[in-house]
Structures are given as C-alpha cells and as structure tokens.
Amino acid sequence: MNLFLLRHGEAESSATSNDGRQLTEAGYKEISSVAKQFASRNLKIDRCFVSPSLRAQQTAKTFLSLIFDAPEAVTLDLLSPNQRAAQAIEFLGNSANENILLVSHNPILSELLALLTKGNVDDLLILETGNLACIALDIVGLGMGTCPFILIPDPAKALSS
C-alpha cells in the first residue's frame, strides 16, 4: 500500500469560520505544482479521502483534476482539522492493498507520517502547506512504513530518501 498524505494548499488567513477558509492563488499554485510532480511519477491512486473543510476540498479537486485516472474524492469527518491520527490509522487498517490519498490538515497529517514511519511523534516532521508525503506500507501499524519521498511545491527543494 502507498499512503499519500497531502496537506491543503495555502489558505486565506481568516474567514467567517475556520472550515470556510479558501485557498489563495498561491495555494492553488502549490497544489498544481505538486500534482504535476506526482503525475510525472506515473503513480496511481485507488481511493481519495478528504476533510470536509473548504480548503481541503478545493485542494483535492485541484490535485485530482491534474493526475491520471483519478478517483472521486470522498469526504471523511475523521480528517477534519480538529481530529487526531489514531482514528485515521484504525480506518486505514482495512485498506492494505490500495493506494490511498488523504487530503487534510496538521497536526493529523504530520502525526500520521511520524506514527506510521517511526512509531511515535517524538521527532515530528511538519508537513507544510502543499506538501505530499508518500508512506509505503505492507501492514498499517505504528512504525511499519517508510517514507520514500515528500513532494513540495518547489521541486528543486523536494525531499527524497
């Protein structure tokens, strides 16, 4: 299984509600850049789950429109900005042979990356807006994955192991 964690693009700093914050023009550019890098790797996504917040929904729509053979995005409340990683890990336990994209927020995405690759959150790598981390897993569990790459909006600065 490849699990792709995509943090929403840059969003406006304020709105009538946190969930109603929209992507900025720079946020759309971040996501477009990462989607093009993703597409150039010929990677496949079987399922996509997205936070109900507007900025995450806009991120998913933009990203999926720029990749090959994209699935429909399914809104999942457990990816909301105030949720934590434990429920997401439990949810993912049933998806061992699929390539899944989660479009969400911090701290949940950075926690997922740390928990699934290191088994703890002691040395948390913070995913910035527009970053996409890949976690390769045979079994969904604490410390069971590796992170072969992280795509960032400026491909010249992309992280790879």
Image (spheres, rainbow, N blue to C red):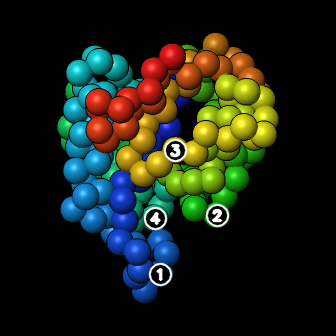
Q: Which residue is mark 3?
A: 127
Judge whether residue 20 can be spotted in this image: yes
How far apart are labels 2 and 3 at the CA level? 16 Å
Q: Choose between 94 and 86: the one closer to the eye.
A: 86
- Confirm or deny contact between disc 1 and disc 2 (CB under 8 A): no
Q: Quadrant of the N terminus?
A: top right
Check disc 1 and report its element: helix, strand or loop: loop
Nearer-N-terminus badge (3/1)? 1
How far apart are labels 4 and 1 at the CA level? 10 Å
- Confirm or deny contact between disc 2 and disc 3 (CB under 8 A): no
- Confirm or deny contact between disc 3 and disc 1 (CB under 8 A): no
Q: Which mark is residue 82?
A: 2
Q: Choose between 156 and 109: the one closer to the eye.
A: 156
How far apart are labels 1 and 2 at the CA level? 13 Å
Query: In the displayed structure, would residue 3 be above or below residue 132?
Result: above
Check disc 2 and report its element: helix, strand or loop: loop
How far apart are labels 2 and 4 at the CA level? 11 Å
Q: Which residue is mark 4?
A: 53
Nearer-N-terminus badge (2/3)? 2
How far apart are labels 3 and 1 at the CA level? 23 Å
